[in-house]
Structures are given as structure tokens and as C-alpha cells.
Amino acid sequence: MTYARQISVFILFALANGLVVAADIYRWVDESGRTHVSDVVPQAYKGKAERIDTGPSQISPEDRQAAQRRVEQERRLLEQREREAASMSERPSPAAVPKAGAMSPPLQSLENPACAEKWRAYRESQECFAPFMRGARTRHGHRRPAHLSEEAYRYCTPVADPSAECPIPAERR
């Protein structure tokens, strides 16, 4: 089929679709209280059926302005939440803030940043593996050996316990 013929077939279909007129839609309620909607109304309900406007919807200027106000309000709320999330990420983690009455970490770990880094990596590794632990307790509360699912190793990196090399920080005691 040539390009010109394809165009003419397309135009023919477009015109044919434009000539199709949508039928009127009616709504009525029968004796049992059921609401019906159809383009064909039974003879018994011709007097009770009401025509439903199926024309294109028009948005009033007031509705448009109200929608724009809601969008603006949602955008401001989203920006506020993003600012709060950013400020939360700038705050120190609860583990970094010493608890009231807690001992300060040993001087060696304060002077040795390598130890602090090892403990941080170990803590992050333990937090990553924790959701994958299974079977620490039975349904009846009895203890049994915990099992680590294989899936954990796809998402988490094992880090050796640094307590042999570095003193245990005060927050871990």
C-alpha cells in the first residue's frame, strides 16, 4: 500500500469515527430499588428515566483555582518534609549521642580513628544482617540456635568483630 493510500485510509477512518454519535444515557430505579443505567430504557420506565449528561466536562474557574491552591499546598508540604529529612540526616545518630550517665569511650578509641571506623563498620554490618536472622525463639518462647538466611549475603557485607583489636566503646558495654 502506498503512502498516499495509507493517508487516505487514515483520513477515511478518522472521518467515520467523527460521524459516530454517542447515544443518550438514561438512569432509572426499578420497583426493587435497583438503579439502572443504559442507553435503552424499558417501556415501563420511560416516564421515570432521566437523561444523564455525558457531554464533555467543563471545569469552572473556581474549581480550577481551588485545585491550583491544593497543588501549591501539597508542594509546600512536600518541600517542608524534604527540609526536615535533610535536617534529620545532619543530626548525629542516637548512638553517637552519649546517654545520660554513660561512660565516655576509652581514650584509645578516641585517639585511634581506625578503631572508631572498625566499630562503625561492624555496627552497620550487624544492623544490616539483623532482619535476616531467623529462629532465635520458637512459637512457645523456647530458645533455639539462630539461623541467618542466605539472602542476607546478597545485601550485607560481613565485618569481623573488632573487640580483639580495639577496646569496646562505652555505648556497646
Image (cartoon, grey):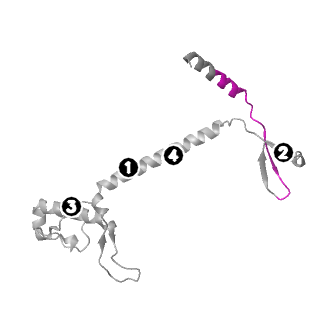
User: Which of the 4 quarters of the picture holds residue 119?
Assistant: bottom left
Identify whether 154 is placed above or below 173: above
Give how far across and how far down residue 101 sits, in percent: 23, 74
Quadrant containing the C terminus is: bottom left
Image coordinates of residue 64 in percent, x first then y, are: 61, 38
123 in the magenta segment: no
Q: Amino acid at mark 3?
A: Ala
Q: Is residue 30 magenta?
A: yes
Q: CA distance from mark 1 to mark 2?
A: 58 Å
Magenta-drawn segment: 11-32
Question: Of callouts 1 and 2, which one flags the residue occurring earlier in the amino acid sequence?
Answer: 2
Q: Which residue lies at the image location 25% right of the left edge and 62% below the top edge?
A: 124
Real-space Cα distance between discs 3 and 1? 28 Å
Instruction: Looking at the image, tell me whether mark 2 or mark 4 is earlier in sequence order.
Output: 2
Residue contact at pointers 2 and 3, CB within 8 angstroms: no
In the image, what residue type sits under mark 1? Answer: Arg
The alpha-carbon separation of the residues under discs 2 and 3 comes to 74 Å
**In 3D space, how far apart are the residues under numbered discs 2 and 4 (Cα atoms)?**
46 Å
Is residue 80 toward the left or the right of residue 124 in the image?
right
Q: Which secondary structure, mark 2?
A: loop
Camera sees residue 7: yes
Q: 10 Å neighbourhood of mark 1: few (<14), some, or many (≥20)? A: few
- Toward which corner of the image does residue 22 lie, by quadrant? top right
Pointer 4 residue: 73
Q: On the image, numbered disc 3 is attached to which residue?
A: 121
Q: Alpha-carbon distance for marks 1 and 4?
A: 15 Å
Label number found at residue 83: 1
Q: Residue at the spot x=10%, y=62% of the render? A: 111
